[in-house]
Amino acid sequence: MSNLNQTMVEKYRNDFLNEVRANVEEGDWVNMCMQCGVCAGSCPLGPYWEHPPQEIFMMIRAGKREEVLTSTSMWMCTSCYNCIARCPRELPITHIMHGLAHYADRLGLAPKEQPTRKFANKFWDNLTKKGRVNELKLGLALYFMNGFMEGIKVAMANQKLGLNMIKTKRMNPMEIIGGHGVKDTSGLHAILKKAREIELAKAEEFKG
Amino acid sequence: MADIIATNETILVVGGGISGMTAALEAAEYGKQVILVEKEAGVGGRVSKLYKYFPKLCHPTCGQEINQRRIKMNPNVRLMTMTEVTEVSGEEGNYSVTLKTSPRYVNNNCTACGDCANAVEAEFDDEMNYGLGKRKGAYLPSRMSFPQQYVLDPRIIGTPDANAAKEACKYDAIDLDMQEESTSITVGAIVWATGWQPYDANKIQPYGYDRFDNVITSVEFERLMDPHGPTGGKLLRPSDGKEAKNIAFIQCAGSRDRNHLKHCSRICCMASLKQTTYVRERYGDDGKSTIYYIDIRAIDRIDNFFQNVKADETVTFIKSKVANIVENKENKNPVLRGVNTEGYDRYENEHDLVVLAVGMQPSVPAGDFPMNVVVNEHGFIEEDESNGGIFAAGCSADALDVNRAVQSATASALRAIQVVNRVAGTEG
Amino acid sequence: MADEMKIGAYICKGCGIGERLDTAQMAQIATRDAKAAIAKEHEFLCNADGIKMIQDDIDNEGVNRVAIIGCSRRAKVEAFNFKDVAITRGNIREGVIWVRPDTDEARETTQDMADDYVRMAVIEAKFCKPPTPNEETAYNRHVLVVGGGVTGMTAAVEIAKAGYSATIVEKTGALGGAAAKSWKRIPQKSPYADPEDTGVADLIKFIEDSDKITVHLNSTLTKTSGAPGRFSADITAESGSTTTENFGAIVQASGYTEYDANQLPELGYGKSDNVVTQAELDAMALAADGGPIKTKDGKEVKSVAFVQCAGQRSDKEGHLNYCSGHCCSTSVKQAMYFKDQNPAIDTNVIYTDLRMPGAGGEDFYRSGQRKGVTFTKGCVTEVATGGSELEVKFKDLILNEDTSEKVDLVVLATGQVANSGLNIDEVGQDEPGEWKTNPESVLNLSYRQGKDIPQLTMGFNDSHFICFPYETRRTGIYTAGPVRRPMDMQQAMEDAVGAAMKAIQAVENAGKGRAAHPRAGDLSYPQFRREGCTQCKRCTVECPFGAIDEDEQRFPQFNEARCRRCGTCMGACPVRVISFENYSVDSVGQQIKNIDIPDEFEEKPRILALACENDAYPALDMAAMNRVEYSAFVRVVPVRCLGSVNLIWITDALNSGYDGAVLMGCKKGENYQCHFVKGSEMASVRMSKVDDTLQSLSLEPERVTTHEVAITDIERAPEIINEMAETIEKIGLSPFKF
Amino acid sequence: MATKEYSFYPGCSSQKGASGSNYQVSVDTMCDVLDIKLNDIPDWNCCSASIGYAGGGELPRLALSARNLALSEQANPDQDVVATCAACWLATRETKERLLDDDSLMNETNEALAAAGLKVEAKQDVRHMVEVLIEDFGYDGLAQHVKKPLEGIKIAGYVGCQTNRPFGIAGESFENPKYLDKLVETMGAEPVENYDKKVSCCGGALAFSEPEKSQALIKDIIESAYDGGAEMIVTPCPVCQMNVEVYQDQINAKYKTKFEMPVVYYSQLMSVAYGKGVQESGLNGQVIRAKKLEDIAGK
């Protein structure tokens, strides 16, 4: 069990609802759900959800910490905002799912091999490095995220796609060296660092 | 309208639905002078378009007959139809009110013989049937209409139809020169009973009321059962006129939803439960009803109505707010998609017909009241000292079922009486 | 007005009547056959000129009975509205020309029909006196309010505000009832976010300051007698001292008793002090006075579970089979007691359907969630009281699993049981002269039919009518609050205002001798020939409103102010000694007898149709508007209620050569629609006896049928008539033609 | 002096040699015709789309967009911020609204920005290019410039998710927005009526991480376009464009379909209708060539 996870378990004992409210983006909203299930029915990847959003909210109230945080469900979110648009109670479900995923990942509970978990991390690393996404590197990183041999396979499978993109000048092999980025990278990194600190401090102070 | 006698001991009741009629009659039968104004051509309001009431499954027209007789027999009630309140000034015990009366183009000579209707060609959507059927340009709004007097649709004025109607009338009852009239009266207290309207189902986009023929509203469904309705009492679906036997009822269609009406409209659960009995009434065991709900709100002792419907094996309950509806292009059947949240079951159910249990929206938009009253965020009039001698009755006060609306109306009659009794100095 | 009767018959030729019928002949019939003093035709009777013609005859010719022969009695009522004269209507528009084809073959039978309706209208006029209020009217502006809870107090306050006086009789030692034992109430004002002050103090203050309201604490009613305008009540204090006061009307706000949770051992009640009812929780909160709520053993509550529908909405023996309406909102209110005091307290509401309707309800629900109250859709199976904490075992219906929750306190949402006194269908009344007060009774009415108000269902004294929630079977006595139907405080308070309205209205009606709903304003009242009475008691027993008592010699005692003018007593009386001035055995019987019965060779049968004036008759009118045809052989007579139909009418009809009779009344049974409650029920019982009459006349039983007809039966009502015509065609004409 | 100027947030995919570079080409052409001047936000950064969440917490992600807003306020005050990428627009507008809606969030964000000497007020409107076209020019205004009406082409307007929800464009409904259809008509082509996959999701970023699941969604989107008789699909979103266009051979391979459905941007339709050539309209950037458009552009 990761140290952070350990601390959190001790801090909130079995009050998972409050743990979520304190540490998860828009977590305060969880309790507003009235179990209508319109989110579950509206999700394009609905059938792949082990636990649909409204059920996750119920599980949080029921204190099913382990089951929620180790679930692959939140990682199914495509950010299509269908659930948000239809939710009769105004819950920012998309954000809550992102928040839960993020928190689970922080605690090291998120399923290691969950592809979107990996990709989302790669994406963040990629964009924060220089401030802008380097699609080529991202693409390659994606191919190789499951190891070198696996990567080659995926790369081969996607070879035609890649060539197409290059042919149509929508992918630039030269991106591998340098590529786009912001000028003030240090400033950007300072901002992100500070933001992170503030966020953690706030979670510390939470008082139900 | 010169002959209206009203003083600050008179009570004005706005709205001739069951709440307004009740408030007016209770006050009048107590002995007060009452002016009852109704913006439509006759009294009866929303309930006169219902087939049956829950939980007794009796017919609203029955009570309407009694109330209409009470009005006919009571000299204290002065009924003004096609009339709206445009302005209210003054204070408790002394209001001056401006009324606008639209031309009916038919006077009291009318004997309701119907010759004018026969003479007129033009047809329009029948409001009585929520536009599901047609009616003539000269018409008696319904068989129960009171006053029992025909109306000319303003759209035929200036057309040959208007003259045809006039010529057809042997009793000089048609007056094409009638103009809108404005009247000013003084009253001591006002009972506001303008009631509700069904929430606009077009706004509930995921359910495609505007796109799919076989998605209708609960109020329209009532008309299908009515022997005077557009289908003569048969449950025929719009797309192909075939009998609809497998019917879905979607609860909270526009209620309990921040995208629409935030409040619970109270009546919809009971209305849908009642409507499943219609399906049984028509098809017996061959019918199938499915209710998609969040909470079934069959309050107090009428919960046993819910228990009885639950015991009916042709009725299924699914705890789910339906996510969206698509149309099966082959047979025009609506296909409902969603998740049953009692144990996470994903469904994709095809039905012959979908009935949206649409919510209750106050008839008067919050900003449009001609007087100062406290209105809550849902558009209902709050009970408040600062309302002075103005009292809400029925669904102007809250989303109420008929029984509670009449209760509320009876109470508002007393509040109005208290005011005018103070004015008259007869409070002891 | 003139004592000598003078009938004017006025025949309208409008609406096609003139073209279809020989009105001159009808005028002749009116004078020659039916003995009208004056008979006039008019092109357009309901217009100003026609009305003037009639009014002139009333003013100048001394006409005091007016027979209008034209459209239905339901049409043009405002126009044909003449003061101080009796008015009857002969329906030859909706009743004749609109239901008959305009053909040569049909002309003769259609004319016969119209001629008879002329005879009937004029004869009816002959037997209708313009009603005058009876002399024994009493006016008393003092209202008795039974019960000093929020409902009763509100009723008294509103009555006082209207300028009347009220006396509250409260059996306990204090005003306020359940509300006074509560910390806060469910919010009644926008934004419906937080519990509100109960408002009890304000009500009590108003009552104490008011010179119009008197209060009797620790007191009960030991005898209540009389009628609207002249009720007399014995108010007896614990000490035994009794004062007798007179009242014009009564509001019964006897409230509810909380369901006995001892019947719920499976939920731990009685086994642990930490399993309490909602009422007990409110008492704890009241004691805590805004501070932390503590369990009996003084421990601060850190977690609490609310179990909804405890012993409610269940068919189990001893449980309540209804929903008490307020409990969901009450639990949210009580959960807020904890959350507002300390957000860290865990509060969970376990429900199956969360029922917080209307604008306020949903707002309050959301507010609860915002404050951190959690809601679990689940069924509680058991509350285990063994351990240090309570364990609530339930099935989570969303997560679909059996689970449990450990809490410090469990609150059971038990329901409301109406304090409606005796069920008079089970507990009969003492015989006259043997009066005994029954401590179980709320009102201790001296009424022959029993000591309390008839119960509708589930022990509640509610009205049976959706359109008329204050319809009461004991005129001038109105129930309000949870005794009428389970409800929360806001509804109870509004209900009290409504009941107060009806009470002062009853006071005014009684003072003027006017009937109450549904024949509001009717001045007629049952008149009774004592010397003819056989003391059979039928009128006393059958009166749907318990208006009739018995005197020491067992003669019926009519209490006009309690009477609703349905005529059930008139229909019940085997010796026909009960009648109204404007509606009597004769006013109908003579119409039946005085139509023209063609001899058997003419092949013109006659069918008598007695139709309830509120449903069947309008249905026939509307059928006519749709131009639905029916047999020309029928003669339709509207009746106030099928309950008023006296068997003699049928026997006379058959004796005088009618070939058949149909009775059309309202739906009976559990969901009865008869607005006089038992009218159609009574009629069908009586008609079951008509077979004997038929046998004695050796007539076929098919000749008399009784039907339930709803106002919407626009196709069916005419069918019923036509079916009878066919039946007669099959079995042949009656032999009794003279 | 241009008729209209906006503070422009191009976004990563629009960059040279990036997946949406052809979008940018056509946008420039279109703006040129409409005399719109786009002033790039200097040194803008990625918005983290809606997939950065695993690594980036709430505030860091908000800070990213806040930085762009701050820079925009410095460089192009009193100009509306305009984005062409749905994700960019959504992330930026969401940030604006959440900052304005929550003071503490606003303070925390500024505290973070201060680390780079920046400050945000989030006062500027944040708009999608399509909003600009519809609201500031109007369909009639856009029609005026049409030189070569796209006659005889039937086009399915695929709105997708993020230009539609949660904000949406021109007050249209979430379930059946009509603005693309109207644009198609305005350019002289024929829209597919009630295209029922109009607003369904293409899988977004999950097209990379969950190709099977996403491609199933994409298949339906293309299939129902064919059912509606469409010859090409038009979209306002680079993610939609790429996902729906570039995986068609993989889908064909997997589902034995024969898809070859061109997927273009509204700006490409407009450039062509405005008489511009294949290059200027970025049509050479199509993996599946939009021949019908090229023909018109070639004329």
Image (spheres, rainbow, N blue to C red):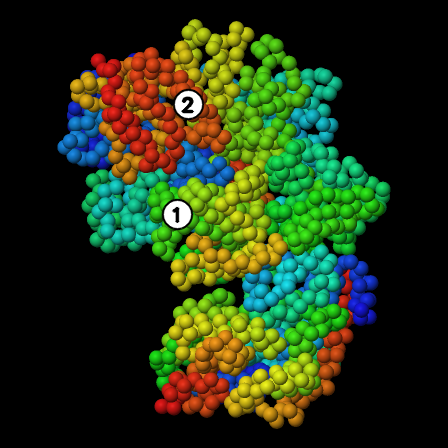
Comparing B93 with A205, the one in front is A205
Residue C415 picture location, percent across and down: 66, 37
- On screen, residue C26 versus residue A41, left or right, reads left
**In 3D space, how far apart are the residues under numbered discs 2 and 1 (Cα atoms)?**
33 Å
Check residue C684 in the rendering and tell me which mark sits there, or answer none. Answer: 2
Residue drawn 66% across and 61% down? A56
Comparing C467 with C728, the one in front is C728
- On screen, residue D257 versus residue C702, left or right, reads right
Comparing A175 with B178, the one in front is A175
Comparing B396 with C637, the one in front is C637
Q: Mark 1 points at which residue?
A: B235
Residue A63 picture location, percent across and down: 73, 58
Q: Are marks 2 and 1 on the same chain?
A: no
- The chain carrying label 1 is B
- On screen, residue D116 versus residue C20, left or right, reads right
In the displayed structure, D114 sits above or below B361; it is below
Residue D114 picture location, percent across and down: 73, 79
Q: Which amino acid does label 1 sit on?
A: Leu
Residue drawn 47% across and 15% down? C538
